[in-house]
Image (cartoon, grey):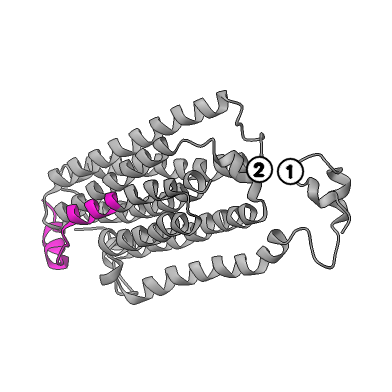
Amino acid sequence: MDDTKTDHAELAHHHPNYVKVWAILVVLLAISIVGPFLGIKIVTLITAFGIAIVKAYMVAKNFMHLNIEKRFVVYLLSTMLIFMLLFFAGVSPDVMKWQGDNWQKTFVAQEHPAGHGENAEAAEPH
Amino acid sequence: MRPIATTRTAAGLPTGRLAVWWVVASEIVIFGGLLASYIMQRVAHPEWHMQAAHTNVVAGGFNTFVLLTSSLFAVLGHQAAEQGDGRKAARMLYLTCGGAVTFLLVKSVEWGHEIHEGFTLQAHTFWSFYYTAAGLHALHVFAGAIIMAIVAKDAAKGLELHRVELIGIYWHFVDIVWIFLFPLLYIAK
């Protein structure tokens, strides 16, 4: 056996009860599947996306051990998430308000005549 | 004597682990950009829910369960490696590989059915996002399974046990990506 055993013994840390964490994750998964059947939009949003965030946090903390990792790793990953939000903030106004308030996307009208294609509404003059 | 690349450190943590964190960081931008684009389009086009209604929640939910369980095996493998038990670590990694294979099998059956129904990559922009996001994720599952099998082979001999943790970190990230893909592609209808 090589010397990794000794090194790993030195690096060993307190492990949470992984099976318990997994069981909680499975229960949360069940809730996220059942939630939308109630047909209430806010409940679906919370049970689907709220729970997804909680599950991701639990995996990152307990399985990836981010809670005991060097802080700069957390900052590194957070920076990437901020980049993602920056991208969203910069691009979403154009994508999500594609019909426009004070402009017309004339190229959409040319490519998708009214009544055809999924962007057909864009062909309507504003 | 271990290779110098695994022992030297300028950042306060093993170089291999630092490298995996960089991989994860770059993957966040790749998947994040794709998912952010999808969310923008979904909000802009509420009518896409009619396409999303055709996705198979049972298959998606089962695959989420499979990935969560495989993550459990991966972290138990890490725990075993820390205790110097290479054989147990390898066993856990092979079980994780089994999860990856199950995931890909379910996905191939699911996709085969959807393509047969006419929901192809070009059928609608929703399906373009669906196949791109889930396909990119499936590629990561496939790559992870291969790397894991290689790591497990060495771990069974008690070699390079630190790699068990490294492939585990990658695998948990792949799990987290699916945790977000599942509600976005299957539940939001």
For disc 2, the marked residue is B125
Q: Name the residue: 47% across, 54% down.
A: A40
Examine the image and state in which quarter residue B99 appears: top left
Q: Amino acid at mark 1?
A: Glu
* Figure quadrant of the N terminus of chain B: bottom left
Q: CA distance from mark 1 to mark 2?
A: 9 Å
Secondary structure at badge 1 equals: loop
Which mark, by number, is residue A35? none
A28, B64: nearer the viewer: A28
For disc 1, the marked residue is A118
B110, B25: nearer the viewer: B110
**Residue B90 in picture, x, y percent from top left:** 19, 43
Q: Amino acid at mark 2?
A: Thr
Q: Name the residue: 58% across, 56% down.
A: B39
Q: Name the residue: 11% across, 62% down.
A: A6
- Asked if residue A108 is positioned above or below residue B55 in the image, the reply reads below
Q: Which residues are magenta?
A: A1-27
Can the viewer see residue A34? Answer: yes
Tell me the crowding category of disc 2: few under 14, some 14 to 19, or many 20 or more residues within 10 angstroms, Cα based.
some
Can the viewer see residue B146? Answer: no
Pointers 1 and 2 in contact (C-beta within 8 Å): yes
> Is A68 on the left or on the right of A126, as rendered?
left
Q: Name the residue: 61% across, 65% down.
A: A88
Tell me the crowding category of disc 1: few under 14, some 14 to 19, or many 20 or more residues within 10 angstroms, Cα based.
few
Secondary structure at badge 2 equals: helix
